[in-house]
Image (cartoon, grey):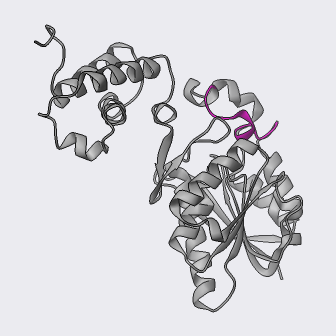
């Protein structure tokens, strides 16, 4: 016999989980978090879970769900609990040394695919570098969508490279991806058709003001961009011309309000801004530079 007030069906558990998260005061989408965590506990895709709201959940799955909810209430981000996050067309495993790939970054994936697809259509090269690859989400998404492309992906963190290797293998692009442990472009040769990066760009003084879920669970090396948030852009601007073809491109994600400063850094290094593209919220997020001739 079921315990009094104990949820039984999937729908009951979903409501109970959302209510518990709400009562804990978490600023989150309580229903979505409940659905994602219950799907993880039950070993089912979230959509399948939603279609079976009247099914009875096993006791084991209910206990797993309760433990996952406790972790969420303690402040652990939902995708860190699950251990993976969807990005572009795939899911990517996470690790402590990787950022969670976020929707904003899909902007530069789309920009890169436009640039590289045009090169492929013209019979030109499609070899690019993804600097600070983390999970490999940018490089792997591009390689998966564009069969002609080849990539070098670098990161300074060994754990990030292991995670990227796992993701590349599962998604089936390992044969076109070289992983390199290095800082920015150091040790990477050319000629490349494109350099792509979502580098650390948060000003050091702003780190303490980040949401706790970011500050305590994303790797600091992937967040802190130095005193003015521009250290990584300086390093990339100083070395990009060395590895690029004369008609090559640089594609960068930037933080809010950084467009002018990053444009000036690359102009001083011999690059011209070809495009600035906003993300879905209207914030300038992706910059495309080409070499001055």
Tell me which residue sits at (57%, 67%) in the image. 142
Tell me which residue sits at (62%, 41%) in the image. 99
Whether residue 85 sits left or right of residue 202 in the image: it is left
Q: Give the prevailing secondary structure in the magenta stretch.
A: loop
Residue at the bottom extreme of this rendering: 123
Whether residue 150 sits left or right of residue 230 in the image: it is left
Q: Quadrant of residue 2?
A: top left
- Is 236 covered by the magenta stretch? no
Query: For the C terminus, which image quadrant?
Result: bottom right
Q: Position of residue 152 (x, y in %)?
A: 73, 65
Q: Is residue 120 above or below residue 172?
A: below
Whether residue 263 sits left or right of residue 85 in the image: it is right
Instruction: Give the tally of numbered discs.
Output: 0
Tell me which residue sits at (49%, 50%) in the image. 103
- Is 223 covered by the magenta stretch? yes
Q: Is residue 261 above or below residue 98?
A: below
Closest to the observer: 66 or 266? 66
User: Can I make out residue 225 in this image?
Assistant: yes
Q: Is residue 292 above or below residue 234?
A: below
Q: Position of residue 16 (x, y in %)?
A: 24, 20
Q: Quadrant of residue 186?
A: bottom right
Whether residue 68 sits left or right of residue 287 in the image: it is left
Q: Position of residue 74 (x, y in %)?
A: 49, 16
Q: Which residues are magenta?
A: 216-226
Query: For the N terminus, which image quadrant?
Result: top left
Q: Is residue 55 above or below residue 285?
A: above
User: Can I make out residue 277 in this image?
Assistant: no
Residue at the top extreme of this rendering: 4
């Amino acid at each position: 016999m079921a315990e009094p007030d104990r949820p039984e069906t999937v729908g009951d558990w979903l409501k109970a989980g959302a209510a518990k998260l709400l009562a804990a005061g978490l600023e989150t989408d309580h229903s979505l978090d409940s659905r994602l965590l219950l799907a993880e506990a039950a070993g089912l895709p979230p959509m399948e879970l939603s279609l079976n709201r009247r099914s009875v959940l096993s006791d084991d799955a209910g206990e797993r769900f309760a433990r996952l909810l406790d972790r969420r209430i303690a402040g652990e981000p939902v995708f860190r609990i699950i251990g993976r996050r969807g990005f572009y067309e795939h899911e990517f495993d996470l690790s402590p040394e990787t950022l969670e790939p976020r929707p904003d970054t899909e902007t530069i994936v789309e920009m890169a695919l436009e640039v590289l697809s045009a090169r492929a259509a013209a019979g030109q090269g499609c070899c690019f570098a993804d600097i600070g690859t983390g999970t490999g989400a940018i490089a792997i998404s591009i390689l998966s969508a564009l069969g002609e492309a080849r990539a070098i992906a670098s990161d300074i963190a060994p754990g990030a490279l292991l995670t990227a290797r796992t993701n590349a293998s599962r998604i089936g692009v390992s044969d076109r991806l070289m992983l390199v442990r290095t800082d920015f472009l150091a040790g990477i040769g050319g000629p490349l058709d494109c350099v792509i990066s979502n580098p650390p760009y948060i000003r050091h003084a702003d780190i303490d003001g980040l949401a706790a879920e970011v500050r305590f669970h994303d790797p600091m090396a992937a967040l802190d961009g130095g005193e003015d948030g521009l250290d990584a852009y300086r390093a990339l601007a100083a070395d990009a011309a060395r590895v690029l073809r004369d008609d090559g491109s640089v594609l960068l994600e930037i933080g809010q309000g950084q467009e002018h400063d990053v444009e000036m850094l690359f102009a001083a290094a011999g690059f011209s801004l070809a495009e600035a593209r906003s993300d879905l919220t209207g914030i300038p997020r992706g910059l495309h530079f080409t070499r001055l001739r």
